Amino acid sequence: MSQPVLSAGARQPTEPVPSDAAPGRGSPQPGAARRSARRAAEISLYVGPALILYVLFVLLPIGLAVYYSLYKWNGLGPLTEFIGFDNYRRALDDEVFRGAITHNGIIVVLSIAIQGLVGIGLALLLNQRMRGRAALRAVYFAPYILSEVVTAVTWLLMLQPDGLVDTLLRAVGLGDLIELWLADTSVVLYTMFVVITWKYIGFAIILFLAGLQAIPQELIEAAAIDGAGRIQTIRRITLPLLGPTIRIWAFLSIIGSLQLFDLIWIMTLGGPANASNTMATYMIDRGFQRYEFGYGSAVAVILFVISFVVALAYQRFVLRRDTEGALTRNVR
């Protein structure tokens, strides 16, 4: 049955106006206002607690550190001696602090170059089907779950003169390589890097294994059908698809290396002769050991600024490709 067609000039029947409609054009509807208020209450409920904690435990300490850094203060008396940016000038002129920044930079470079290669190699190995694979994964990951204190004390005992490390080197005929691992200024930083690698390599392996598990097996099988060898498959398919995981791990490794404190503080206290000092150990030494809280706060602010700038630059220039859908751009 055909519907009646209204002519262009025909007048439309007047529809009944709801009783709860707003009288004025553009004025908010009561139902929409209630939904908006409920949505705002839900957002406040979910975000409010986290925002309060963020302000109390992140923004407020940063603000207080900046405030304290402008004073010469021993942490006990009132803040009366305002010295402006003198603490910052003192830190940047201090050769020991510049050396600590260099040590952090060395740890960053070694972590990316050595821990990355070792972690990827072991992850590729442990991703293969083999007997005892689960046990090997647990063995490599075990050091990561140990506390820094336990790790530091264990290695401190093993690296003592005539300790377990020296005994093992003599047993395999490498006694000539024995050094004063924690007392030689030319060796101690690299000794600490070995301990750091032993502690954190398990985390890198687990992260890379998770990335390898996400690679579609069909791509590997297709490459094998096309005649690609093992090395070519790794270079052309596995590593490009593992790229996002590698970049995330590198970001965490860089930030962790810049803030390195626990292991070095327990094992060497930044010594000998400041040869293993980092920015964090230098800050704790000046702030809490020598009661220069104003100066220590200035060092803390410098450490925060360096970490913040590095993090922003890394996300801007390295991680940006991961948010632009370029994950498979290099797969050929």
Image (cartoon, rainbow, N blue to C red):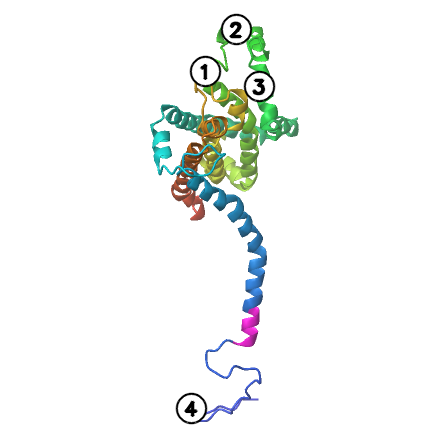
Q: Are marks 2 and 4 in contact (CB under 8 Å)?
A: no
Magenta-highlighted residues:
29-35
Sequence order check: which comes first, mark 1 or mark 4?
4
Image x and y of residue 206, in percent: 57, 33
Which quadrant would the C terminus be assigned to in this image?
top left
Residue closer to the observer: 2 or 149: 149
Under mark 3, the amino acid is Trp
User: Which disc number belongs to residue 187?
Assistant: 1
Which quadrant would the N terminus be assigned to in this image?
bottom right
User: Which disc number belongs to residue 70?
Assistant: none
Sequence order check: which comes first, mark 4 or mark 3?
4
Task: Look at the image and tell me whether residue 237 can be seen.
Answer: no
Q: Residue at x 40, y 38 (%)?
A: 305
User: Which disc number belongs to residue 8?
Assistant: 4
Name the residue beneath numbered marker 3.
155
Distance of label 1 from label 2 (alpha carbons): 16 Å
